[in-house]
Every structure is written in C-alpha cells, then in structure tokens.
Image (tube, helix red, strand yellow):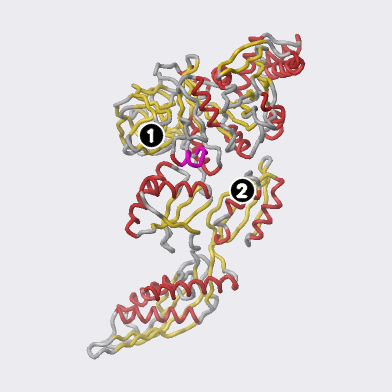
C-alpha cells in the first residue's frame, strides 16, 4: 500500500440504526474503489465487513470492521460499526478513533432510534457528520421526509448537496447541486448530463439553501452575502467545508447501496467535506507519573502516541490489536512502551486488515490505523508510546452492562474451559463482564442485552467447544432478626471413651442495618474457659453463613455470650464450636427472623414523552421514585428498586420507550422482604434442600 500524508487520510465511522443498509453501502464503496471485483451481499454472507460466522448467520453486524481503501489519492479507513444497541461498545470504540461520521439513514423508515443515538454519540465527541439517505430505490422511500426529520429530530442543520432523480423504484441518479449537473449511475459508474427540466425549480431552491448555509459558516462570507446576495463557487465550497468541520452544517447525500447507486459520489464527498486527522484538534493526554496535562498533534514530527481500540482473536494470527497512531510513527519489529500497564512491548509485523485479508506495512504514521499481532501485555484502551516521553491518552469510556445471566457448564469437566473461554471473550469485548457471586457461587455473565449475551454463549460453543446453561441470577438475599432472644446451646456426646461437652448461653438481638455482625463476650467467673470462647464465636459465624430461614447468610445481629458451663475432661474447642452453632440457630429462630433483599439505586434517562410510562413501570416493580431532574431534552428519574425485579428491565425499558431510554443501576442497601414474597422464597429454599437430600 502506498504512503499517505496526514492530510490524505480520512478515518470515517459508518453508523446507523440496525437495518439501514450501512454494510451494503460499505460494500458498494469498496467495490467502486476497486478493493473487490464483486459486489457482496449481506443476505448471501459475502460482504467483506460481515465475515464473522455469527454475522453471516444473523445477517447483522456484530463487530466493527476496518475497511481501508484508496480513493482519488486519499486513504479512507472506513469503520463499519454495528447498528444494534446490544453492540454499542463496538460503535464507541470506532468513534474513539474516527475523525468523522457517515450517518446512514433508511430512506423508508427515516430517522429511527438508533439514528438518534448514533447522532448524539457523534455530537458528544465533536465529530463532523455527513448524512446519507439510503434505500432510495425502495417503495415508500422519501428523501424530503428524511431531510425534514433530520432537522426536527436531530436538531441539526441538514444541507442537501444532492437531489434524487426519480422516486422510489424509479430512482436512477442524483442532481449534483454544487455543479448543477445530473449524475446517473450505470454499474456503479457515474455519467453526467444536464439537470432534468422538471427539476429546475427544486434545484434552484436547494442551491440557494446551500449558498445560505455556506454564508452562515464565516463572518466574512455572511457580510458578502448580505451585501451582494450571492457567493462565488469557491466561496460556497469553502464555507460548506468550514461549516461541516465546525459541526454547524451537515451535508446530506443520496444512495441506494444494493444496486450500487451513489457510492462513488459518497466517496467524493468524504474526501471533499470530511476532515483529515490534521484538521482535528490535538488529542488530550497526561503524563503517567506527574499527571501533568499534555497534548499530541497528528504529526510525525512529535513523539509517538498510539492507542489500542479493539482486540480480537484470529484462528491463525492469534491475538490482534487494532490501534490508531495519534502522533509520531509506530514501526514494525520495534520495541514500544505500554504506558497504561507500565510494561515494555515489542511491536511485531504490522498489517492493514480488511475483512479476512491483510497486507504487511512497514509502519503506521500519525493519523493512520493499523493492526499488530501477539502483543502480550496490551489490552483495549492501552496507550503505546515512546518510553523517553511517555503519555497516557484518555481511556475509552465503555458503558456498564445492563443485563446479567448466570452461566455454568452443562458438563462439569468443561468448567475450566468455560472460565478460560469467558476470559478470552471479555478481553475482546469490554462491554462484557464476568464475575463470581461470593454468596450464591454462581458465575455471572453481564452484557448490553439479550442478543449480546446470546451471541457470547454461541461463541463459547463455537470457539471453545463447550455447552453451557444460562438463567436468571440467584438473588443474594440475607437473613436477620427483628426481636431478641436468650437461648442455650448445649452439646453433649458420650461414646464410651472421652466424650464431648460444650454448654453456652447467648443473647441474640438486631444490630443497625448494614452494621454486620458483632460478637460480645460477657462471660464471668470462668464458666466458659477463655481458650474456648474463640471456638464459640467460630461456631456462631459458621451457622450464620448457613442461614436459618432459607439458607442465606445472617447479617446485622449482635450475639452476646453471657453464661455456660464446661467439663474438665470432655470439653474441647470442637464441642464449644458446635454448641455456639446450635445456640445461633435456636436464637435466630426465637428472635423473629426475616429475609432481607438487595435494593438497587436506579437512574433512568428518558425522553419526556415516556416519563409517565417509565415511572409507572418502576412503581409496578416495587420501585420508589426518589426524584426527577431535567437534563437537556430528557428527564432523569432516580429510584430505588429491588434487585429481584430488575433482571429483565433492560429489555422492558427498551420496549417501553422505543429504545430511546437508558439506565444505570448500582447496589444501594438491603431492606426487609415483604412477608408474602418471603414465604415463597423460604418454600423454594426448602424444596431445593429436599431435592439435594434426595440426590445424596
């Protein structure tokens, strides 16, 4: 691959709502750029970007794909990202290294939830955005409607640079409003001609809108436009690019990806209107030791700073790390410093990857993207730099998981393979989490949605050859007491030789919620020898872990040892430990025991029109609304809700709000479980114990 200067690079993320035709559009662009000699189809599983078996089977993008191509002497690093919300981590990683965004809009469905979400993520990162209205060859497609929806729902300033020639199934080309030429497509290749006569008025009005948008981008152009009423072609072009880079103008293009209509003009627009790395502000960083703020510009004349934004496993090459060089130059077969891990790495051969094909390169210069295999210490988000002038780039902010499954191997012999497989998958996907619940001893797999976890389970089976069972996680209930009791724990056993004897009296009473456990020694007169008192406490603690009501740990109690007796021969640590355990069991039973359930702090961000539904849904889950705050056009609802009610909330909220709301959740505290629910939990626990006894 030829060498490119920084201003000849374009790092462009293709984003969209699922099903908008983004992958087909990428395929058409690669075909027009000469990367491939055939136009792949999503339905046939033959596209370059959707090469993963899960993607081919489901006919959706699941992972982002890096698709470099050359167009008119420029290198375009196209990042085809998934459109489904479950795989938002891939979108975030792609946007982190992109300099601009092509937002693909379905010409039939218009602006959808995923469109709004993608637009907002691009805005939050200050990325210049170009909109392409796709599927204009389909029945019921409407370019004008998509344009007006973009203005209303995205709150942007969409400026059409093209108008479609022919509507719906008659769509066959576009009018280039800047050059006022008709462009029709034959086998993807553009042919120019005069503007159709019946479009003259629409073209004139749209052209005037372009001039106005260009004039608004610069004060000098505004003054000239107000004085003379027009701008030169060069001034229009300059104003449009300035406005696009500043985010005050959003160019809009036309396309129909499957029949390959509009891909070439879109490639031209990317080169003309979207920024190179040199047009972007210097990236922020800080010194790993001092914490002093620094910045790095996209230049090969400054020290090296690169960041890994994606990690994946290749069956032949092994671990692959995708990285962008933000400054300096990363060479093949050279050492480099991982500032995040504070470890040295060796960069092996560097590749330019495109689907399953790769091409070796000598290095990756500032602003470009590359792939390196078999980095030992490096993971997603790590900064690679010159060890003589180290910096840490800002980490990639991935969202926390919103849904969780318990997961276990169907075959006990596969338990280790499940663990190692999950760890590998988590390394590839930072939005996955795997944890072991210390109370229920379940392995918990958390992710961004049902489909996300379903795909993960499928990969465990396909990549690591293990079958697993999934289910809702067990709620980590706790037990405590509301009343007080004073009981005796007496263990006496005679077996012919030396016997066992331990005798204790304890008081059991509630402690403050969250206080945990307190053991108090009030023994006087040596009725319980001092050397046996720790054994009594140990027996109490072990009995607390086993629980009394339903087998859940007992918490927030105070146990006071105040009396007892011993035998000079038969007393032992074991005897007093058993006596302490018996006393705790009996004491809790007589002190009005209750079950506690975990309560979560929930924060939901929702458009105002769904606020009533969201609040009603939380109330139906025994939630308590704590407050509502305004955040831009959205409402932020804060609530407390039982964990047991929240395992499927991600899917319910998505359905309730058309996918436009999001939430976060964290543990808050424990509260008493209502009696009717507690009785059900106790009965289920008794049934489990009975089944376990039958098995043994």
**Quick one: SS at disc 2?**
helix
Q: CA distance from mark 2 to mark 1?
A: 33 Å
Where residue 441 appears, x then y in whole percent? 41, 62
Q: Which residue is mark 1?
A: 321
* x 37%, y 35%: residue: 320
Q: Quadrant of the C terminus?
A: bottom left
Q: Nearest the camera: 457 or 686?
A: 457
**Residue 265 found in image quarter:** top right
Foreground residue among 46 and 143: 46
* Quarter of image, res 565: bottom left
Query: Residue 588 colored magenta?
Result: no
- Residue range highlighted in magenta: 54-61
* Disc 1 crowd, CA 10 A, few/some/many (<14, 14-19, 20+): many
Position of residue 327 relative to residue 587, above or below, is above
Name the quadrant of the N terminus.
top left
Instruction: Answer yes or no: is residue 305 visible.
Output: no
* Residue 589 horizontal/vertical position (percent): 49, 80
Q: Is residue 58 magenta?
A: yes
- Residue 430's spot in the image, x, y percent? 45, 43
Residue position for label 2 = 654
Label tally: 2
Give the vertical position of 656 relative to 680 (above or below).
Answer: above
Specify which label sits upstream in the sequence, 2 or 1: 1
Compared across the picture, whether 507 is left or right of 653 comes to: left
Q: Residue at x 62, y 55 (%)?
A: 639
């Amino acid at each position: 691959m030829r060498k490119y200067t920084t201003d000849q690079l374009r790092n462009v993320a293709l984003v969209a709502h699922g099903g908008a035709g983004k992958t087909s559009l990428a395929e058409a662009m690669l075909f027009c750029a000469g990367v491939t000699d055939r136009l792949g189809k999503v339905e046939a599983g033959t596209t370059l970007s959707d090469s993963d078996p899960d993607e081919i089977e489901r006919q959706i993008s699941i992972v982002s794909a890096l698709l470099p191509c050359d167009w008119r002497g420029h290198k375009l690093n196209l990042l085809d990202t998934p459109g489904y919300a479950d795989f938002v981590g891939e979108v975030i990683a792609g946007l982190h290294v992109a300099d601009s965004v092509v937002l693909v809009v379905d010409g039939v469905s218009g602006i959808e939830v995923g469109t709004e979400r993608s637009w907002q993520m691009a805005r939050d990162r200050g990325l210049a955005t170009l909109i392409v209205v796709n599927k204009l060859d389909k029945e019921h497609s409407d370019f004008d409607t998509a344009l007006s929806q973009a203005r209303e729902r995205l709150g942007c300033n969409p400026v059409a640079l093209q108008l479609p020639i022919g509507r719906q199934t008659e769509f066959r080309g576009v009018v280039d409003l800047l050059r006022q030429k008709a462009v029709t497509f034959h086998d993807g290749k553009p042919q120019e001609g005069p503007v159709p006569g019946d479009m003259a008025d629409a073209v004139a009005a749209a052209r005037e809108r372009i001039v106005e948008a260009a004039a608004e981008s610069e004060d000098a152009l505004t003054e000239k436009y107000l004085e003379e009423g027009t701008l030169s072609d060069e001034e229009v072009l300059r104003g449009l690019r300035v406005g696009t880079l500043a985010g005050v103008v959003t160019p809009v293009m036309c396309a129909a990806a499957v029949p390959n209509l509009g891909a070439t003009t879109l490639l031209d627009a990317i080169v003309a209107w979207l920024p190179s790395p040199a047009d972007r502000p210097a990236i922020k960083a800080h010194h790993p030791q001092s914490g002093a703020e620094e910045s790095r510009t996209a230049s090969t004349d400054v020290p090296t700073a690169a960041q890994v934004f994606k990690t994946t496993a290749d069956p032949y090459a092994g671990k692959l790390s995708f990285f962008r060089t933000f400054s300096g130059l990363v060479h093949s077969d050279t050492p480099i410093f991982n500032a995040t891990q504070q470890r040295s790495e060796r960069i092996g051969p560097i590749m330019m990857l495109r689907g399953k094909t790769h091409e070796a390169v000598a290095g990756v210069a500032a602003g470009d993207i590359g792939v390196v295999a078999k980095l030992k210490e490096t993971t997603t988000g790590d900064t690679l730099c010159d060890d003589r002038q180290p910096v840490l780039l800002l980490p990639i902010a991935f969202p926390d998981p919103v849904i969780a499954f318990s997961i276990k191997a169907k075959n006990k012999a596969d338990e280790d393979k499940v663990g190692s497989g999950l760890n590998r998958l988590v390394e590839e996907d930072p939005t996955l989490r795997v944890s072991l619940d210390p109370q229920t001893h379940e392995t918990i797999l958390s992710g961004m949605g049902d489909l996300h976890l379903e795909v993960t389970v499928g990969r465990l089976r396909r990549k690591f050859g293990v079958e697993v069972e999934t289910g809702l996680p067990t709620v980590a209930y706790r037990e405590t007491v509301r009343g007080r009791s004073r009981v005796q724990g007496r263990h006496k056993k005679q077996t012919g030789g030396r016997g066992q004897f331990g005798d204790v009296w304890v008081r059991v009473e509630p402690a403050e919620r969250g206080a945990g456990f307190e053991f108090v020694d009030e023994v006087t007169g040596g009725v319980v020898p001092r050397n046996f008192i720790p054994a009594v406490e140990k027996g109490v603690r072990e009995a607390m872990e086993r629980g009394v009501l339903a087998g859940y740990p007992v918490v927030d109690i105070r146990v006071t040892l105040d009396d007892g007796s011993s035998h000079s021969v038969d007393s032992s640590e074991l005897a007093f430990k058993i006596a302490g355990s018996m006393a705790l069991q009996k004491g809790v039973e007589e002190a009005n025991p209750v079950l506690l359930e975990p309560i979560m702090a929930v924060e939901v961000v929702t458009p105002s029109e769904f606020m009533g539904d969201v609040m009603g849904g939380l109330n139906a889950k025994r939630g308590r609304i704590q407050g509502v705050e305004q955040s831009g056009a959205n409402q932020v609802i804060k609530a407390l809700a039982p964990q047991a009610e929240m395992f499927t909330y991600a899917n319910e909220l998505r359905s309730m709000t058309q996918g436009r709301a999001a939430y976060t959740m964290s543990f808050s505290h424990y509260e008493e479980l209502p009696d009717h629910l507690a009785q059900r939990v106790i009965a289920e626990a008794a049934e489990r114990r009975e089944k376990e006894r039958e098995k043994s």
